[in-house]
């Protein structure tokens, strides 16, 4: 990343931090993934029960590896031996001390948009886990809430569908067709516009491109 893009991310992050704090979120800005990993581990005490959804950004900064191998009670659905066990572990994640997630998009005024197929990730953001930690690269930050919804549906979802597979319109063409197919991963769209109780959700914004 060149110095001008870094300056761009740094300046937008300062605006976003102020707006997130106004909405009662805790929020930190880290210039790179190494700083972001250190901050996340600082926030999660050893011995805590930790779960996550499809947290590509957390994987990319090395956080999930640390949680899997460190002194934490990690609920890792990827270790499930059967589809039924995987679903049960996803349900267990709703009662963790800490839940790790990414963001499909964040508007500059401090509103987060996430989109899900099953709904387990957005359910955890809304209620259940004691604390939510959002790892988000500054590439997820857009100007308005409308832009954030558009990004979630037309950028994040089609890319994620390439990862999951299946022949939905966006899986085949790469473009959203507002489908109602069995494999649709846009079943639930969540806008998180305020944090209640205050401080339950913490953002770790990263001055790099992370996730989709």
Image: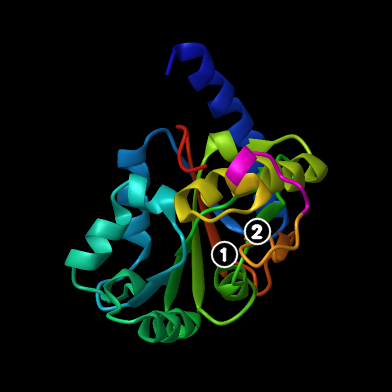
Identity of the residue drawn at 63% across and 30% down:
12
User: Is 209 positioned to the left or the right of 9 in the image?
Assistant: left
Q: Nearer the viewer, mark 2 or mark 1?
A: 2
Question: Please, is residue 89 above or below residue 28 in the view?
Answer: below
Secondary element at image label 1? strand
Identity of the residue drawn at 70% across and 66% down:
187
Check if residue 47 falls in the magenta segment. Answer: no
Q: Position of residue 100 (x, y in %)?
A: 44, 64
**Marking on residue 41:** none
Identity of the residue drawn at 61% across and 49% down:
157
Return the disc, 2 or 1, that comes first in the chain's sequence: 2
Which residue ends up furthest to the right in the rendered image? 146
Among the 4 quarters of the image, the one containing residue 88: bottom left
Give the residues in magenta.
172-178
Secondary element at image label 2? strand
Please tell me whether the stretch drawn in magenta is mainly helix, strand or loop.
loop
Identity of the residue drawn at 63% across and 39% down:
173
Which residue is nearer to you in this view: 169 or 39?
169
Label 1 crowd bin: few (<14), some (14–19), many (20+), radius 10 Å: many
Label 2 crowd bin: few (<14), some (14–19), many (20+), radius 10 Å: many
Q: Which residue is mark 2?
A: 115
Among the 4 quarters of the image, the one containing residue 196: bottom right
Question: Please, is residue 157 above or below residue 70 in the view?
Answer: above
Q: Position of residue 145 (x, y in %)?
A: 79, 46
Q: Which residue is mark 1?
A: 201
Check if residue 176 falls in the magenta segment. Answer: yes
Question: Please, is residue 146 above or below residue 22 in the view?
Answer: above
Q: Position of residue 158 (x, y in %)?
A: 60, 45
């Amino acid at each position: 990343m060149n110095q001008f893009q870094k300056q761009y991310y740094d300046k937008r992050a300062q605006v976003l931090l102020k707006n997130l704090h106004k909405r009662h979120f805790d929020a930190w800005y880290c210039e790179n993934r190494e700083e972001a990993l250190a901050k996340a581990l600082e926030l999660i005490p050893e011995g805590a029960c930790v779960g996550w959804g499809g947290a590509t950004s957390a994987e990319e900064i090395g956080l999930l590896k640390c949680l899997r191998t460190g002194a934490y009670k990690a609920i890792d659905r990827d270790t499930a031996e059967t589809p039924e066990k995987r679903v049960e572990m996803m349900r267990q994640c709703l009662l963790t001390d800490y839940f790790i997630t990414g963001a499909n998009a964040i508007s500059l005024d401090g509103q987060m948009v996430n989109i899900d197929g099953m709904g387990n990730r957005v359910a955890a953001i809304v209620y259940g886990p004691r604390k939510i930690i959002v790892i988000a690269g500054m590439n997820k930050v857009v100007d308005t809430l409308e832009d954030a919804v558009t990004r979630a549906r037309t950028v994040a979802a089609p890319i994620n569908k390439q990862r999951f597979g299946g022949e939905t319109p966006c899986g085949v063409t790469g473009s959203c067709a507002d489908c109602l197919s069995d494999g649709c991963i846009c079943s639930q769209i969540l806008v998180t516009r305020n944090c209640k109780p205050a401080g339950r959700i913490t953002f770790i914004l990263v001055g790099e491109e992370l996730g989709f």
